[in-house]
Image (cartoon, grey):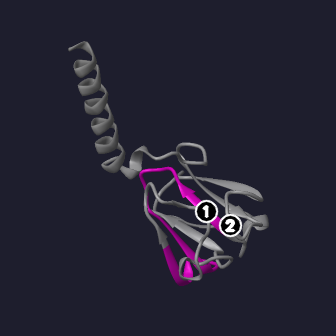
């Protein structure tokens, strides 16, 4: 009888673990950059390596230039904020726009996401 109860408990716990794993929210996933920042990386075709550039939210609804060393180089991003960051191909928040929503992170920006093309950004 004890073995049956133990087997039932193990089976139940395993089922709960699978259910939680399948239904986990992306917000619970691990970020690689610091909380409160959108961090961009350059120098790698895939992964969070190379130089890291944490961008603070700061004042919203203002266009900013990327740091000089990061201009036209971002290859990965981690938006660990509750704000939408819009990155632009050209200075002055002009040209093609690439939206990175709150909680988004990718270790390899695709060409359609502006890989190696960002020059300025807007928070809001």
For this orientation, the residue located farthest to the bottom is: 95
Report the side of 57 relative to 10 (left or right): right
> Residue 29 placed where, x, y %?
46, 47
Above or below, comparing residue 100 to residue 111 in the picture? above
Magenta-highlighted residues: 75-98
| Residue at the image point whose x is 77% and y is 67% from the top | 43
- Depth check: give the residue in front, 64 or 8: 8
Q: Quadrant of the N terminus?
A: top left
> Residue 78 placed where, x, y %?
56, 56
Are dots 2 and 1 in contact, CB under 8 Å? yes
Q: Quadrant of residue 75?
A: bottom right
Give me the disc on residue 107. 1
The residue that disc 2 covers is: 46
| Residue at the image point whose x is 59% and y is 78% from the top | 114
What's the CA distance linking mark 2 and mark 1? 6 Å
> Residue 96 placed where, x, y %?
53, 85
- Depth check: give the residue in front, 43 or 64: 43
| Residue at the image point whose x is 28% and y is 18% from the top | 3
Q: Quadrant of the C terminus?
A: bottom left
Mark found first going from the N terminus, 2 or 1: 2
Report the side of 86 relative to 90 (left or right): left
Helix, strand or loop for the magenta stretch, by majority: strand
- Depth check: give the residue in front, 55 or 77: 77
* Residue 111 is a magenta residue: no
Q: Quadrant of residue 107?
A: bottom right
């Amino acid at each position: 009888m004890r073995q049956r109860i133990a087997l039932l408990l193990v089976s139940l716990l395993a089922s709960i673990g699978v259910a939680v794993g399948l239904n986990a929210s992306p917000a619970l996933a691990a970020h690689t950059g610091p909380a409160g920042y959108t961090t961009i990386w350059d120098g790698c075709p895939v992964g969070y390596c190379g130089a890291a550039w944490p961008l603070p939210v700061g004042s919203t609804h203002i266009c900013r230039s990327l740091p000089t060393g990061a201009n036209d180089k971002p290859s990965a991003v981690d938006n660990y904020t509750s704000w939408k960051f819009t990155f632009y191909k050209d200075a002055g928040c002009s040209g093609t726009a690439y939206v990175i929503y709150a909680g988004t992170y990718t270790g390899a920006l695709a060409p359609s996401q502006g890989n190696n093309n960002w020059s300025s950004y807007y928070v809001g």
